[in-house]
Image: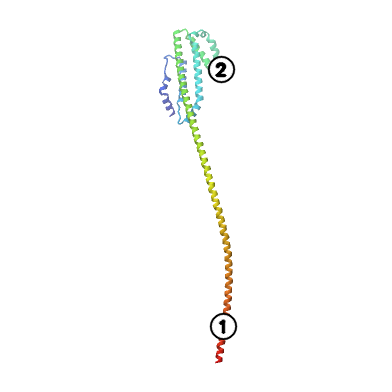
Amino acid sequence: MTEITMKNQLSQPHWWWLDENTTVRRSTWLQSTVTELNEKTKTMLKLIEEDADSFAQRAEMFYKKRPELVSMVEDFYRRHRLLAERYDQVRPESGIRLLNPPASCKHSQSEKLTSFDDDRGYDSYSYSESCDVEESVESEIDDPEHEEEEHEEVRSVAANDVMKLRKEIEILGEKKKGHKDQIKQIQKDDMLDVMKLREEIERSEKENEAHKDELKQEISISNEVVMKLREEIEQFQQKDTIRDHQVMKLREEIQRLNKENEALKDELKQKDTVSNEVMKLREKIERLEK
C-alpha cells in the first residue's frame, strides 16, 4: 500500500522534471550520475510529501526528517561542487591543465584505497573519480567538436541541476515555514488551553473555598443545636430523677397508710365484737328483770 502511494506521489504534476532528458548523448559517467541524482531527489520528495493526520504528528515528522534532509542537501552540495570543478577542468581555457593529468591521476588512483582507510570517504573518492573523467577528456581532446558537445552537455546538466536544487530548496523552505507556522499555532493553542485550564482551576478553587465556608457555618450551627438538645436532655433527666424520688415517697406513704387502715380495721372488728357482747348482755339483763 505504501509503494502504491509513493508511485502516485511520484506521478504528481510538479515532479515531471525528474524524468526529463536534456540531452540525447550521455556518457556512462553522466548516465550513472543522473540516475543517482534522480533517486536521491525522489527520496527527498518522498520525505517532503509524507503527511500526517494532526499538527503534532506533522511537527514530530518534520523534526525527525530534518537531519536526513540536511544530510541529503549536503550531499547535493558536494556533488554539484564537484560537478562545477569538473566543468572548470574540461573548459577550453583549462586545456593546458589537461596536458599533464596522467601522473596526478595515477597518483590519486594509487591513494584511492588509502583514502577510504583514512575515513576521508566521499571527498577522496570524488577526487579520484574526477581524475578518471580527466583521462577520458584527454583521450577526446583531439576532437574539438566532440569536446564542445561534451562541454555543452555538462553545462546544460549543471544548469538544470542547479535549477532543480533551487526549486527543491524553495520547496523545503516553504515546507519548513509551513511546519514552523503549524508548530507556532500548536503552541498558541496549547497556551490557550493551559490558560483556560488555569482559569478553570482558579474558579474551582474559589468555589471550593466558598463551599467549605458554607459547610463550616452549617457545622457550627449543627453543633449549637446539638449542645442545646443535650442540655434539654440533661434537664429532662434531672426532672425525671426528681419525679422518681417523689413517686418513691408517695409509694412509701401509701404503704404506711395501708398499714394504718389495716390496723384500724382490726381495731374496728374488735370493737364490733365487744359491742355484740354488750348487746347480748343487755338482752340477758332485760330478760332477767322481767
Give coordinates of residue 8: x percent, y percent.
Answer: 41, 26
Earlier residue among tags 1 and 2: 2
Q: Which residue is mark 2?
A: 115
Name the element at disc 2. helix
Let me know if residue 35 appears in the view: no
Name the element at disc 1. helix
Q: Is residue 270 above or below residue 49?
A: below
Quadrant that contains the N terminus = top left
Give coordinates of residue 248: x percent, y percent.
Answer: 58, 66
Let me know if residue 257 appears in the view: yes
Rendered residue at 58%/78% (across/down) = 267
The residue lying toward the viewer, choosing from 119 and 257, is: 257
Q: Is residue 203 above or below residue 62?
A: below
Q: Which residue is mark 1?
A: 275
Give coordinates of residue 240: x percent, y percent.
Answer: 56, 61
The residue lying toward the viewer, choosing from 62 and 239, is: 239
